[in-house]
Image: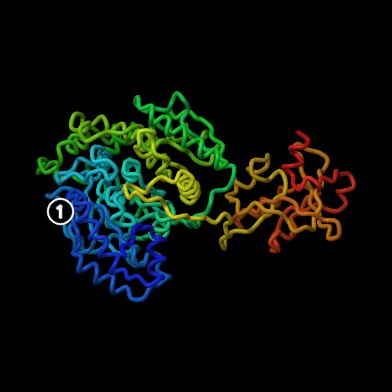
Amino acid sequence: MATESFEISVLTAEYVSGKSPEEIIEEVYSRIETVNDPGIFLHLRDKVEVVAEAANLGEYDPERPLWGIPFVIKDNIDLGGAPTTAACPDFTYIAEKDAFVVAQLRAAGALLIGKTNLDQFATGLVGVRSPYPIPKNAVDPDIVPGGSSSGSGVAVGHGIVSFSLGTDTAGSGRVPAALNNIVGLKPSLGALSASGVVPACRTLDTISIFALTVPDAFKVFRAAAKFDKADAYSRRFDFLPLTASQPGLIVAVPDANSLEFFGDDIQAASFAASLDEMRNLGCTVTEIDFTPFFEVAKMLYEGAWVAERMSVIDGLMKETPEAVHPVTRKVVGMADGLTAVDAFRGIYRLAELTRAAEPALAAVDLLCVPTIPTFYTVRDLDADPIGPNSRFGTYTNFVNLMDMCGIAVPTRPRSDGRPGSVTLLAKSGEDALIAGLAAQLHMVCNPEMGATRMHAANHDLPNQYEPTDGEMEIAVVGAHMSGLPLNHELTNRGARLLNATTTSPDYRLYALPGGPPARPGLICDNENGAKIDIEIWAMPKSEIGQFMSGIPAPLSIGTLKAADGHLVKGFLVEHMAIAASEDVTDYGGWRAYLESVA
C-alpha cells in the first residue's frame, strides 16, 4: 500500500511497523514520473543505486533521526561523485565529496535522491533565471516557482520527498516556501556549515531547509547543525528542542506606513488574518517603523555585496560572459562600477542602520512579516525580469545582513485560493523560539501541505521544556512572572520559560508592604496551605549569582515543591515578614490578586 504523506513522523511510524525504505524509494521515483516536470532535477540519482543504499540501512535504527527519509539538494551543494552546476553548464565540476551538511544528513539515515534546479548562481528570487527547463510551481504552474531554490521548493511542494536543502542569501529559502505552500527554515548564519556549497555572498549565505511541516524542518535542522572547523564562518550554537512557544510573546510587525503589498489587497487581508491568529495564540502584536530594515534591504543589490557575488564568477564574467544567464550577468555586472571605498562605506552604513533598529528589536521577542508582498506569474517575469524579483525581496533582503534567523510558514489560504504565508524573524540563535510559534501557527491554520491535497498529521508540541546541563530551574511567584514588571531581570540574563504550573498544596501567599513594584511572599504551611500559581524558568548557571545578589530582604531563594512533586529552587519569604503583610492565598496566585486590586 502506497504511503500518502511523506511527513517524517508518518514515515517513521511506518518503518517502526515494518515497512522498508526500499518501498518508499520506489514510491519517490513513481511520484517523480507522475509529476513529470523536467525542470525540477539537474541530476537525478539512479533508482537502483538509491534502493541499494536504502537496503544497506539495515534494521530500523531509532538512534538515526532521519532513517529512511528521502530528500533532495539544490545544485549549488556538493554530492560526492556528482556534478555541481550552480545552473551554469560552463561552471560544472565533479564534487570530490559530500558537502558537510549533506554528510551529516546521510549519517543520520537520510536518503539523497538528486540535485535540483535553481536561479543561476543563486542570484534571484523568482526561479526562472536558469538555462535549463524552468520548474513549474507545485500549486499553480502559472505562478513562478520562486528562487533561487526553485527545484528544491517545488519537489517538496509536490510531496516527492520529505525535505530538501536550498540556500538563502536574500530570501531564497523563504520565497519558494511561500509560493509552493510549504515551510522554509532559514537558520542563523553559521549554524549550518557552508563547506561544499558554491557561495553567492559568502558572508551572508546559509543552507536552508524546505519541509511539509515545521517539526520536520526543525528535526532536519538539528541533525545538520554541527560545528565545522573547516568552515571559517561556522559558529557554535546550542539549539533547544522544538517546543510550544511561551505565552505572552511580543511580536513586532511593520506599521501601516511601512506595509507594502503593491496593490494586492487580498495579500494584505491575508496578513492581517494571520496576525489575528497569533493574537489568539496569546501573542501581543505591536507595530514598529520598518524604515531601517527597508534601507538595509536596498543595500543587498545596490552596494558592496554585489561585488561579493562577482568574486565567485569573475573568471566567467571576464572570459566567457555569454555562459552567464543574461539577467544574472546584468545584476552581477553592477559590481564593475564599485570600488573598495564603496565596500567600506556599505559596511559602515549597515552598522548604522542596524544600530538604528536595535531599540525596536530590544523591546520585542520577534518580528512577523509577509513572506512575499504579492504574487507574480511566469508571464509577468517575461515582461519584466527585474522588477518582480526586487519586490519579492521586500521582506527578505535585510534578514541575513542583520544576522537574523527566520522561518516562513504557511497560513490559511487567501480568499482567492492562493497560499497564505508569513515569516517569523528573530535575532541570531533564536531558531527554536520562532520555530515553536511557527509550528503552533501552522497547526491552527491547518492549510494543505504544498500541493499534496493533504493536511498535516497532528503534531502535539511539548509545552514544558527541560533545562540543559548549563541551566538551573528557578520558580517565580510574583513580579518576575511573564509580562510583570521584573520579568526583564530573567529575560535579560537569557532565562527562558519552562512551564506555568502551581506549587503543591502546601503554601500561603502574602502581599508584602512597600513597592513599587508590588511583591508577594511565598511561605510553606503544611497544615493550612493551598496551591499557588508559579512559573518555572531556566536560567544559565553563569547568571545565577548576579541574579541572586539583587534579591532584597525579606525575600530569598529556597527550595519549594511544584505540583508534580519535584523540588525546585524558587522565591520564598522569611517568616517574620508575614506579620505586616496581607494574606492573599485565596486568590490562588499573584496575577489574580493584582487583577482584584486593579
Left or right: where 181 falls relative to 459: left
Q: In this view, does 500 lie above or below 49?
A: above
From the image, which quarter does the N terminus lie in?
bottom left
Instruction: Categorize mark 1 by other alpha carbons within 10 Å: few (<14), some (14-19), many (20+).
Output: some
Picture mark count:
1
Q: Residue at point 33% right, 51% down?
A: 207
In front of the other: 75 or 144: 144
Image quadrant in which the C terminus is located: top right
- The location of residue 201, given as percent across then percent down, is 29, 44
In the rendered image, the residue lying farthest to the bottom is: 59
- Residue at the (35%, 54%) spot, across then down: 232
Q: Where is residue 124 in the image (x, y as percent from the top left)?
A: 25, 39
191 vs 522, nearest the viewer:
522
Residue 61, quarter of picture: bottom left
- Residue at position x 28%, y 39% from top? 125
Q: On screen, 106 above or below 261?
A: below
From where the camera sits, is residue 337 visible? no
Q: Name the image quarter holding residue 225.
A: bottom left
Q: What element carries label 1?
A: loop
What residue type is disc 1 on? Thr
Q: Residue at x 79, y 51 (%)?
A: 522
x%, y% of residue 30? 23, 60
Q: In this view, does 494 lie above or below 46?
A: above
* Residue 377: image location, x then y, percent: 24, 34
Left or right, 554 with reference to 153? right
Q: Looking at this view, is 3 or 501 the one in front?
A: 3
Q: Which of 373 and 334 is in front in this view?
A: 373
The residue singled out by tag 1 in the image is 92
